[in-house]
Amino acid sequence: MLKKLFGYCGASLVGVLLFTGCSQKSMVYKNTKYTSAARHKATMKPYCVLGVTYHPTPVEVGDTMKGISSWYGPNFHGKYTSNGERYNMYEKTAAHKTWPMDTIVRVKNLDNGKSTIVRINDRGPFVKGRIIDCSYAAGKELGLDKSGIAHVKIEVVGVATQGKRKPATPKKVKVVQHTPTKKPHGYGVQVGAFREYALAERFKQRYQGQERGKRPVFIRKIEDGDGVLYRVYVSGFKSEEDARAYRTEKGLQGASVIHV
């Protein structure tokens, strides 16, 4: 029985929802392209695993946590995860005991400085001290395929796309720029992307505080076949090389670099 609960190097609850009858605060649950509203509601209820009760809670952009990360792969590839989708070890996803499904999380390996971005789609790991169980693809980017586990810092950077994905169609993309107090210039690095403007604005304000006015931070509204996406950029870099160096320094591997 325990083998069914524990992953390759971690301990994730893939496709198993052991919920109690405890009450849950009133929340609005929305469908995403990955998780139904009903499944979201179910995965936010308290549940019990191996005698321990866990209480999923809402999170906000900027929330952080430190602990140990593990990874899981071959033993669960193709099986159902807690949000109802099939686990794909080659996609960058992860399991967390309490954070909501489809939460986008930056994971930084404090042992080697490597980082990656994952989406929560499962519950776990159920081993004391471990806070997140990364997929094989995400774990490989962090170096977990060699070390097995590592000390990490995880940070909420957004939520996954709202609504059902529409078929790809040739469509003109409309870009609307939200101009900051200081005009953007040079090159920019994308530091976040959100489907809700309020979250993007909050994230922008947070980065403005970090930059202390040294670099402009702005939002671009992108309208395409999937709806609206608000991208947050830090600009003011004189060259593409400077922008890429900033991206590496901040652990934003994979973030886009643009000429403003």
Image (cartoon, rainbow, N blue to C red):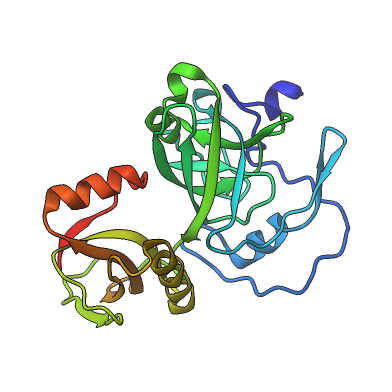
Instruction: Between residue 48 and residue 204, name the one nearer to us.
Output: 204
Task: Tell me: 64 left or right of 13.
Answer: left
Residue 25 on image: x %, y %: 79, 70
Q: In terms of image quadrants, where is residue 193?
A: bottom left
Instruction: Between residue 66 and residue 30, name the one nearer to us.
Output: 66
Residue 91 versus residue 187 in the image, above or below: above
Residue 78 versus residue 7 in the image, above or below: below
Instruction: Between residue 109 and residue 23, name the one nearer to us.
Output: 109
Q: Residue at x 58, y 22 (%)?
A: 9
Q: Residue at x 70, y 31 (%)?
A: 129
Residue furthest to the top in view is: 146
Residue 190 on image: x %, y %: 29, 60
Instruction: Between residue 171 and residue 142, name the one nearer to us.
Output: 142
Q: Residue at x 52, y 20 (%)?
A: 148
Say whether residue 167 is visible: no
Residue 253 versus residue 56 in the image, above or below: above
Residue 142 on image: x %, y %: 42, 31
Task: Tell me: 104 left or right of 243.
Answer: right
Quadrant assignment for the N terminus: top right
Q: In terms of image quadrants, where is residue 251?
A: top left
Q: In terms of image quadrants, where is residue 92?
A: top left
Q: How many marks?
A: 0
Residue 216 on image: x %, y %: 28, 70
Q: Residue at x 50, y 65 (%)?
A: 32
Quadrant assignment for the C terminus: bottom left
